[in-house]
Amino acid sequence: MSQTDAPEKTPLVKEIPPKAKDLSDWYQAVCYKAELVSLAPVRGCVVLRPYGMGLWERLQGALDSRFKATGHENAYFPLLIPESLLMREAEHVEGFAPEVAWVTHGGNEKLAERLAIRPTSEVIIGTMYAEWVQSYRDLPILINQWANVMRWEKRTRPFLRTAEFLWQEGHTAHATETEAAAEVAQMLEVYREVAEDICAVPVIKGEKSSTERFAGATHTFSIEALMPDGKALQAATSHELGQNFAKAYDIKFAAEDQSIRHAWTTSWGMSWRMLGALIMVHGDDRGLRIPPKMAPIEAVIVPIVRGESEDVTRAARDLFATLRAAGIRAKLDERDLRPGNKFSDWEMRGVPLRIELGAKDLEAGTATLVRRDKEKGAEGGKIAVPLADVAARIPGLLDDIQTELYAQARAFLDGHTLSDTDRAEFLAHCKNRSGMVEIAWCGRPACEAAVKAETSATTRNTRPLGDAAGPCVACGEPATVRAYFAQSY
RNA sequence: CGGGACGUAGCUCAGCUUGGUAGAGCGCGCGCUUUGGGAGCGUGAGGUCGCAGGUUCAAAUCCUGUCGUCCCGACCA
């Protein structure tokens, strides 16, 4: 387009517009062209296609194994919630009412009572817990459910905010507040670990301000990731519900001292929104870059077949079998396409490692391994590896790629986490979407509202003040916490 | 929900101002030549112009409504 600058390079993947030009355009192109999702003929809903499902399954696996390891079990509760049940916890109702979808008819008959399609399941699960809990001996209850939920959102985007979405929701009940608080902290740490160690998305862990708190919770904690446009994305939450829900839904138990007490409950969730974070954080102008631990396909073999040569095909199939036997999530691409098409296709899909195998390689007894995290032509981007060593080399390379992607994302977050001491600078950063702006803060809703009105930024979460007492950078009142401000998705 | 834009082939879009037989590129099928970064030539298929009304002899084009998508805000545990 530009006539004065150096001629633009032909993009390696032509379906994807430049990421830096318009993140939203880029994001949607990646989601659709890489066949993660399709828009469905239902407002605000997407179809999760096989490759997108593959990503979700990786995330599920990472979370589920950790839930099990921390003593949780899976269960499943109904999709529909009777209206009268939903109404019992006042704050909860008020928080969710505007986005609840309702079932009003069964067949042709109007229902006596409307049924809510669950926007979250505290209500129905709490009701069941009330039935199941009699004694302190019945506690704790540590249950997770994998489910879909529905929230009638005004504006939707694939993964980040859809009317129906997939998530997991953990719901636990405990005899004491201390135990509940420990549970909430434990699960928040599980989320941090999965975000950072599996998705390679660095996050900021902290407590939500009172205005950002879950409807009906006493404390809400979150992990917050930073997107390339400087907006924050809440990637998971973990809530202390105090005894609010236990009181509303009558979860009572006889304690050891024979007193009747209300349980302390928690809930915590991560959704497919995490995939949206992963896509935005790691993707580039060629499309997705999937961290190996999340990749449905870790390595794709592209045989470069010329004419009638059977040797390459046979060698590629042998290598494929070897990789599979070694436990590598490998794919052999024998489609009748030219190599260049396959290269860009798999790059767009973010497969971490490409293995090129052609006549030249066979002659040399090697395969050519190409890292997706490297730019084309970059040092170490292409590696010739003796055929017999390929399977053994891959795990190390995948580790390197995982580490590299995390390091790049970490550098971005660190480079865009700003600590400001000056009010004017603080407000400017908030307004300009410079990243996470970390300040001493008074914690008052009025102060947060004022900052929001002026800059569109709010607190994403907060951490303890430490020894550094002093004034709130935003308003000058005494600070009570350190807060991360940013505009958010 | 307020402001704006858009909806035409699988994809990206032109055509609409000034109504008159539906277009391009890419993709797709077939044939041949090709194949280490998105091939070439030939040939073929593919669209009730989002949907519903209205105006008109005639509507992709003008009008109204509606649904959907995107952008900016508001909202969003």
Image (cartoon, coloured by chain):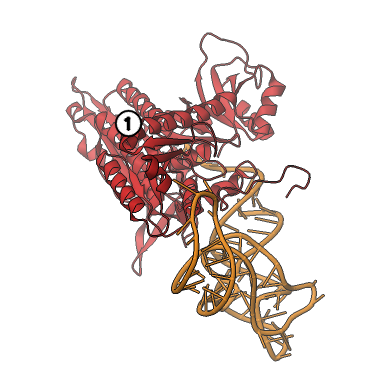
Q: Position of residue A120 (x, y in %)?
A: 38, 44
Q: Nearer the viewer, residue A449 or A189?
A: A189
Report whether A239 appears left or right of A465. left
Query: According to the colouring, which chain is orange?
Result: B
Q: Position of residue A480 (x, y in %)?
A: 54, 16
In the rendered image, which quarter contains the C terminus of chain A?
top right
Give residue A232's quadrant in the image.
top right
Q: Amino acid at mark 1?
A: Thr
Q: Chain of mark 1?
A: A
Expressed as whole percent of the image width and height from the top left, the position of residue A85 reads 34, 46
Asked where in the image residue A189 lies, by quadrant, the reply is: top left
Residue A195 visible in the current orientation: yes
Q: Secondary structure at mark 1?
A: strand
Q: How many marks?
A: 1
Q: Nearer the viewer, residue B28 or A133?
A: B28
> As displayed, is residue A60 above or below residue A317?
above
Q: Is residue A312 above or below residue A469?
A: below
Q: Residue at x 58, y 47 (%)?
A: A26
Residue B46: image location, x then y, percent: 51, 76
Along the line of sight, the residue nearer the viewer: A251 or A400: A400
The outermost residue toward the top is A467
Q: Chain A: what color?
A: red
The residue labelled by disc 1 is A265
